[in-house]
Amino acid sequence: MKVLAFSTSNSKNSINKKLACYAAQQINNADVSLIDINDFEMPIYSEDREKESGIPQLAHDFYNAIGSTDSIVMSFAEYNGSYTSAYKNLFDWTSRINMEVFQSKPVIMLSTSPGASGAQSVLAAAKNSAPYFAANVIDAISLPNFYDNFNEVKAIVIDRAFNERLLAAISRL
């Protein structure tokens, strides 16, 4: 099984990237491709830019990366209760290729933050909008208090309930 894993954060030290990587590694016999959205940085989307220059190749590359995989593991960073601007821009450009951005792929949506909310606001928004963009959401799971629940030395989640729910979601891929 080919798995595409990424974080919606453009931070080089993203805790959501660590979580996405960990989750994807729990999938047995998976060929995991971990991508960094920094590699897909484009001008801010606008209708005017699209009319003048068309859709950037990087949006096509991201869309094709989704298309060439069997499933997706993505972890949402939350900025001020919403999507990061880096992800929103990438998503906006990609949706101009095809509104079915996720191409009916099974998706495990994750989120985490240093605080107790675990970025649940953005995770709920992503899950609720997913059907409009052809995402087959297997589960949406938040990990609160990242630094208390993730052992960075071993790169593992130590929260038993999270791990049980993650493995249950993986079994439905």
Image (cartoon, rainbow, N blue to C red):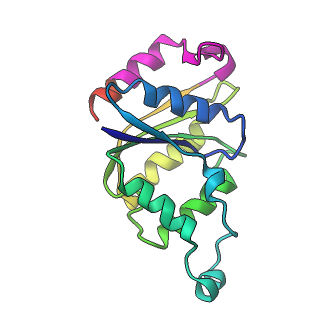
Q: In the image, residue 93 lies at what x, y percent?
A: 56, 68
Residue 111 location, quadrant: top right
Residue 5, given in percent of the width and then of the height, sits at 48, 40
Task: Classify residue 89 by image quadrant.
Answer: bottom right
Q: Residue at x 52, y 48 (%)?
A: 125
What residue is shown at x 53% (from left), y 66% (from top)? 59
Compared with 34, 50 (above or below) is below
Write the residue at 28% across / 27% down: 171
Q: Residue 158: percent from the left, percent from the top?
A: 54, 11
Outermost residue to the bottom: 52
Q: Which residues are magenta?
A: 144-167
Q: Is residue 73 left or right of residue 155?
A: left
Horizontal side of residue 134 vs 172, given as left or right: right
**Does the magenta portion include 128?**
no
Q: Nearer the viewer, residue 71 or 158?
A: 71
Which residue ends up furthest to the left in the rendered image? 172
Q: Left or right: 124 with respect to 53?
A: left
Is residue 42 visible to the viewer in this orientation of the structure?
yes
Residue 164 lies, with reference to residue 41, above or below; the image says above
> In the rendered image, which quarter contains the C terminus?
top left
Decide whether residue 159 is among the magenta residues: yes
Residue 102 sits above or below residue 156 on the image: below
Residue 1 on image: x %, y %: 30, 38
- Residue at 47% in and 19% down: 162
Count of numbered circles on the image: 0
Let me know if residue 83 appears in the view: no
